[in-house]
Image: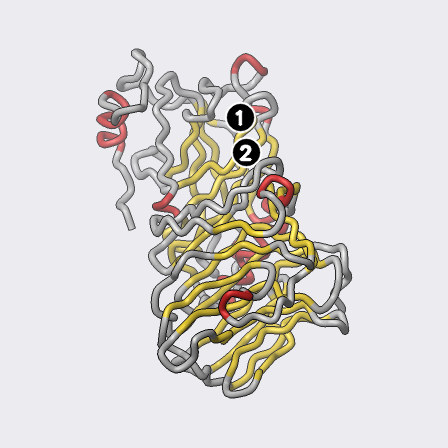
Amino acid sequence: MAPAKTLNEWMSFCNNPPPGVTAAATCGLDTFGYSRTVTIDHTKTGTVNSTNFPILFSGTYSFLATVANGGLVQSASGWDIMFTSDAAGNSLLDFEVESYDATTGTIRAWVRIPTLSVTVDTVIYLWYGKNCVASLANKTGVWDSNFMLVWHLSNGTVLSAADSTSNNRTGSIFGQTGNDMATAAFIAGGAILDGVNNYIFTPSLGAPPTSMTLSAWVKPNAAGGVIFDETGTNALNSGWHDSQLEVETNNTVKSCVWIGSEKCVVAGSGIVYGNWYHMATRYDQPGATLAGFVNGALGASSAATKQYPNTGVQYWNVGGTDTTNGGNSAYGSALIDEVRISNIARSNSWLLSEYNNQFSPSTFYTLGVEVAH
């Protein structure tokens, strides 16, 4: 993980921007004009601290509109917005701005929190309003080395499966043309899975990890479809399907692995088609445990030992099975947003925090009063 920039490093960056980045001539020793505290409610974060947790900072804030639109931000791109871990503004936090509207001050940004505490509220600082307009965002630094990929799925108009992590694992879009699959989704833009032939295929993720966690926002439109499907090849089997997350015909979501036969646990029941849900599946190989989650709540877990835990090359299909590697064309009918795959078993607290934060950012954190500098 890249270390946070100090204020001096920030000034050096601003005064000597890298190629392709233009800093205003007025950029110098002046500070940001304004700051506010962002206080994260520890009662929403579970029972175990989470390390390097990416929070969603999202909302419409009139003060984050540009000066021309009645706000306090100088850059039409929102470049004079940053987050720090300290009140003095010396320790820059890694952040990624997914979208910013200069007219309204609507922003969606992901900010890496070094330690998300479950015992005391975590406080970070939002800074804005500076003449220097060199962006301080560190997109890839937000996502720790355990993230194999993170897809935001773009803006609702143009579909993109670009990866926000440093792994650069951009997905391949199949079915309709990419933009025909684009849709407004839960957080920003997402993808339409039509239940017929739409899916997004990851590039090779290398040898399957010993443990894994997958999560996404899913709006199922019908039953009987696959949302996540792990697939790959090895010397023993030319095409294998080892793990899945499925929306079943009896209004349930199931997490499954192949142990010689299919082993499934109920991640959640009472699913209403047409509603959004945060769905996750987790496999912990050291503990040989499979678990499924809906809306941050553990549905069920069970002992399970995967048949192909560490062999061959792993891929994932989002929205269906991969027919080129032995799939059965079980496409899911749903909308999907914010796809994440990790190579570790994320904790129950992590998944609960992920849901609470993304479901309602305005109740996950509170903004303090504005401080002028």
Q: Is residue 53 above or below residue 157?
A: below
Amino acid tagged 1: Leu
Tell me, for residue 64, which label it has, or none.
Answer: 1
Coordinates of residue 86 in the picture (x, y in percent): 35, 39
Q: Secondary structure at mark 2?
A: strand
Would you say the residues marked 2 and 1 are in contact, meaning their CB atoms lie under 8 Å apart? yes
Along the horizontal axis of the image, is 263 left or right of 192?
left
**Residue at 36% from the left image edge and 76% from the top image edge:** 311
Q: Position of residue 147 (x, y in %)?
A: 40, 57
| Of labels 2 and 1, the one closer to you | 2
For residue 107, the mark is 2
> Which part of the image, by quadrant, shows the C terminus?
top left
Q: Residues within 10 Å of mark 2 (few under 14, many from 20)?
A: many
For the question of whether residue 86 can be seen, the reply is no
Disc 2 or 1, which lies upstream in sequence? 1
SS label for mark 1: helix
State the CA–CA distance, disc 2 to disc 1: 8 Å
- Asked if one can make out residue 369 in the rendered structure from this viewpoint, the answer is yes
Question: In the figure, 261 relative to 93: above or below?
Answer: below
Mark identifier at residue 302: none
Residue nearer the viewer, 81 or 236: 236
Question: Of the residues shown, which amino acid type is indicated by label 2?
Answer: Ile
Q: Position of residue 350 (x, y in %)?
A: 49, 62
Front-most of residues 233 and 278: 233
Determine whether 358 is above or below 290 in the image: above
Looking at the image, which residue is at 38% across and 35% down? 137
Residue shown at the point (63%, 45%) measured from the top left: 181
Q: Identify which residue, 176 or 276, lies in the foreground.
A: 176
* Residue 83 place in picture, x, y as percent: 41, 37
Image quadrant assignment for residue 157: top right
